[in-house]
Image (cartoon, rainbow, N blue to C red):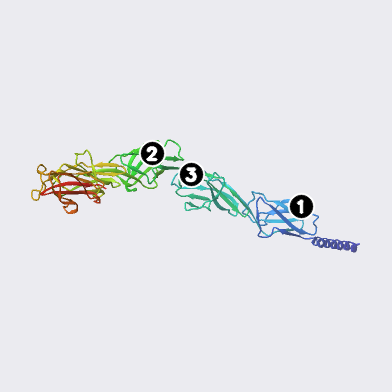
Amino acid sequence: MLLSIRSLALLLMLLLVHGVAAAQAEPAITLTAPAAGDQWCAGASQVITWDTANAGETFDVLLSSNGGVTYNVIAPNVTGTMHQWQVPININADSMYRISVRRSGGGLADTSGMFRINRPPTPTLQPLNISIPVNNHAMFTAQTSGWPKPAVVWQVSTDTGKTWKNVTGNQAVGVETERLTLYYVDAKMDGNLYRATFSNQCGSDTSKPASLAVTWLEIVEPNGGEIACAGQPITIRWKLQGFTGQPQYALTYTPDSGKTWKSLATVLQSETYTWNTVLQQAPSLNYRVRVQLTNNPIVSDTTDTTFILYAKPTVAANPRDTAANQGRLVSFAAASYGLPLPEVEWQGSDDNGKNWVRFSSTTSTEVNGRVETSLRTSAIATNDSGTLYRAIFRNQCGADTTRPALLRVIKDPVSGVETPSESRAFAASISPNPSHEAPTLTLRLAAGAPVKVLIAEPTGKIIATPFSSPFLPAGKHLITLPSGLPSGGFACVVRVGSQQQILPMVVVR
């Protein structure tokens, strides 16, 4: 009996050892995915796979978020050798994960190496709309969750969101960070939309667009190159954008490209101003106008380039009355201010100013911003006494005329050769005078005599002898004078016998 009990105990021990060996011989589970170092994405569908000889059994899939210290079942009683797991979008991305697969209810299992679960970007802070004066700095901020930290690219749309392009340029700083700064925004940026695009290996997402409203002011006219005349009105027009409320403006101007500024108006509400310039306004090629929004003085605009304010001529010096001996040269001088510098025309009148004849032979020079001019002529004969001379200055803004100067001719007491008209035995005249072509000398002789006709310059130099005869009978004679003389004043000397008469002759071309 004792032997039987020992035999029974031995039998039970053998059965126990056989059962353990049988259990150890059960088919193993080999987990094939995920592998150590893999990176999965939250919100994505990931496949967990394993190998086993008993594919007909059921398995539990477990997840550890602390490197394998603890596990939680994420899929019980799975049949086959794979499980498609929808990774929760809100899963903690900053952890070390492991997957374990075991037979349902316990038993043999296999565990993966550690891997990561990353999270795609999701904006957590949206950029805000910005309204800012021109030339200020605009700052947009956007933030996102996601692991690993998403890359950032800022984009801009200039067509209300229809198309987008990456922000570039020297004005933009931080285009690849969560904070975009735009320095010195200008009017062209008004209405632009800005957004941030975040991306990592698990996907991308874009923030909502934020708008940029720029308050800016632009001068419409004058804006460079225009020409106005002092004493005439100048219309200044501008437009304001991106400002709410009742604007007020101040206007200033500079005649020297910005070295000095002077006030035009300080409290304006309309976008138009008429500048009634005065004749005394300083002429200059370098005028500019500035309009400033007094509600926000940083909002202003200045004409892009200079415009011109011309001035009509203003006589600065009048010719003086002059007395000269017969046959002498005389000179008249005048001067004028004006911008552009005026052109000069000298005129003469022998009928007390009723009719004026132009002289083409004059001189002009620029001295200290004004035109100085002179006319040289000769006191040809005593009947030139009473002739008036004047200068007219003209430019595109108008004209100004000097006071007339009177010429008085004094008969030379030393070399006077002119015979008094009451004792002459002849009469002579020139027509037309002034002339454009060859004038005609009309000579009437009371008796036959030798006749010679000479043409002299104002200096007295003889330049032509159009007629010479040892004897010309009494009566009327027509003598053609030279036609090729230049413009100016000349003396026609008529000698009849021992008598002589000097006739002034003016040629106008």
Which residue type does callout 1 highlight?
Val
Task: Give x and y (percent) for residue 57.
Answer: 80, 54
Of 20 and 231, the residue lying toward us: 231
Of 309 and 117, the residue lying toward us: 309
Task: Give x and y (percent) for residue 444.
Answer: 16, 43
Q: Residues within 10 Å of mark 3 (few under 14, many from 20)?
A: many
The residue sitting at the right extreme is 1
Query: Label 3: which residue?
Result: 190
CA–CA distance in space, label 3 to label 1: 60 Å
**Snapshot quadrant of residue 236:** top left
Q: Residues within 10 Å of mark 1 (few under 14, many from 20)?
A: some
Q: Choose the circle earlier in sequence order: 2 or 3.
A: 3
Q: Choose the circle earlier in sequence order: 3 or 1.
A: 1
In the drawing, does residue 215 fall left or right of residue 204? left
The residue sitting at the left extreme is 414
Q: Residues within 10 Å of mark 2 (few under 14, many from 20)?
A: many
**Secondary structure category for the residue under label 2:** strand
**Any part of residue 155 in sight:** yes
Which residue type does callout 2 highlight?
Tyr
CA–CA distance in space, label 2 to label 1: 79 Å
In the drawing, does residue 8 fall left or right of residue 239? right
Question: Which mark, by number, is residue 249?
Answer: 2
Residue depicted at 8% across the width and 50% down the height: 414
In the drawing, does residue 354 fall left or right of residue 37? left
**Secondary structure category for the residue under label 1:** strand
Of 349 and 181, the residue lying toward us: 349
Image position of 290 with respect to 80: above or below: above
| CB within 8 Å, label 3 to label 1 | no
Query: Label 1: which residue?
Result: 78
